Image (cartoon, rainbow, N blue to C red):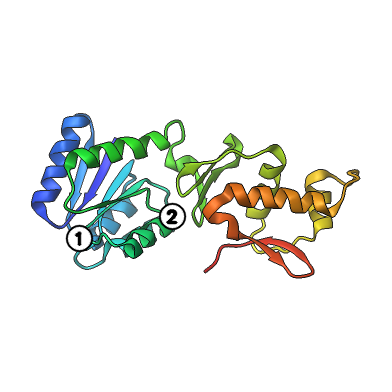
C-alpha cells in the first residue's frame, strides 16, 4: 500500500508517518511538505490514499484536491485547522473522503484511514469513473455518492447509464420510454416521472444532476 502524506509541519508529518507504519508495517509512505511537490509526485505515481493538509506552501490543499480529482478518484483525507462548516463542505464538494480538524489524535486519523479504505474494499479507485460527486463502475454495478455506496434497481441503472453516457442531452419522456423500456412497451409518461423521482431520491446530494427541462423532458448535468 502506498500512502502520500502532504503536511508542511514536519513534526506532524513525521508523527503521522510513525503511526501509519506502526499500523501498516509494509506500507510505502511518501512525505511531502508543499502543494506543488504533491502535485508533481501525484502526476508521476499512483497512491492508495492521500492525507492532505489544507494550508500548504505554494499551492493550497483545496487546489491540490481539485486538480487531483480531475483525473483520479484516489481516497483523500483532508487535515485542517480550518474547522468551520464552510471549509468542511468545500472539501466534501471537491470530492474528499473525510475531513479531520486540528488538533487531532493520530489514533483517530488511523481509524479514519481504516474506514476510508474499507469503503473501497473490492473496488480499487482505478476501477471507478467519476462525474462530479458520483463515482461509478457500470460493469460491476457499483455507484458511490460522496464515496457512499447506493443501490439501484435495474431500470434506475439503465436510466443513470443513459444519462451519464450522454451528459447534457435532453430526452423527452417518450425518448426515455423507448430507450429504457423498449419500443414495444405500452406505458405512460408517468412511468418515467416515477422512476426519475426514485432515482433522484437515491442519488441524494447528486439529485440535482437530473434536471427537468421545461416542456421538454430531462437532462443530466452537474452544476458548474
Q: Is residue 105 left or right of residue 140?
A: left
Q: Nearer the viewer, residue 75 or 109?
A: 109
Q: Residue 180: image x %, image y %? A: 78, 46
Q: Mark 1 — residue?
A: 34
Mark 2: few/some/many CA within 10 Å (<14, 14-19, 20+): few
Q: Is residue 102 left or right of residue 207?
A: left
Q: Nearer the viewer, residue 212 or 201?
A: 201
Q: Residue 78: image x %, image y %? A: 29, 53
117 up-or-down from 210: above or below: above
Q: Residue 58: image x %, image y %? A: 21, 68
Sequence-wise, the earlier of marks 2 and 1 is 1
62 up-or-down from 139: above or below: below
Q: Residue at x 77, y 51 (%)?
A: 192
Q: Nearer the viewer, residue 197 or 21?
A: 197
Q: Residue at x 67, y 54 (%)?
A: 163
Q: Count every numbered label the image shows and give the total.
A: 2
- Helix or strand or loop: what does disc 1 sit on? loop
Spatial CA distance of label 2 from label 1 is: 20 Å
Q: Is residue 39 left or right of residue 145?
A: left
Q: Quadrant of residue 116?
A: top left
Q: Residue at x 45, y 42 (%)?
A: 126
Disc number placed over residue 71 in the picture, else none: 2
Amino acid at each position: 500500500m502506498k500512502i502520500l502524506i502532504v503536511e508542511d509541519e514536519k513534526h506532524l508529518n513525521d508523527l503521522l508517518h510513525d503511526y501509519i507504519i506502526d499500523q501498516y508495517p509494509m506500507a510505502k509512505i511518501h512525505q511531502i511538505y508543499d502543494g506543488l511537490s504533491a502535485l508533481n509526485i501525484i502526476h508521476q505515481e499512483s497512491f492508495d490514499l492521500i492525507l492532505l493538509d489544507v494550508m500548504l506552501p505554494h499551492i493550497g490543499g483545496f487546489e491540490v484536491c481539485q486538480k487531483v480529482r480531475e483525473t483520479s478518484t484516489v481516497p483523500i483525507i483532508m487535515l485542517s485547522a480550518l474547522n468551520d462548516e464552510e471549509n468542511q463542505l468545500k472539501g466534501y464538494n471537491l470530492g474528499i473522503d473525510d475531513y479531520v480538524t486540528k488538533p487531532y489524535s493520530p489514533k483517530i486519523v488511523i481509524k479514519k484511514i481504516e474506514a476510508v479504505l474499507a469503503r473501497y474494499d473490492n473496488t480499487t479507485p482505478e476501477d471507478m469513473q467519476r462525474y462530479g460527486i458520483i463515482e461509478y463502475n457500470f460493469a460491476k454495478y457499483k455507484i458511490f455518492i460522496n464515496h457512499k455506496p447506493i443501490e439501484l434497481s435495474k431500470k434506475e441503472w439503465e436510466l443513470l447509464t443513459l444519462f451519464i453516457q450522454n451528459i447534457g442531452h435532453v430526452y423527452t419522456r417518450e425518448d426515455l420510454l423507448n430507450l429504457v423500456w423498449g419500443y414495444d412497451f405500452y406505458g405512460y409518461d408517468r412511468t418515467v416521472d416515477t422512476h426519475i423521482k426514485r432515482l433522484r431520491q437515491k442519488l441524494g446530494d447528486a439529485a440535482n444532476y437530473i434536471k427537468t427541462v421545461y416542456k421538454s423532458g430531462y437532462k443530466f448535468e452537474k452544476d458548474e
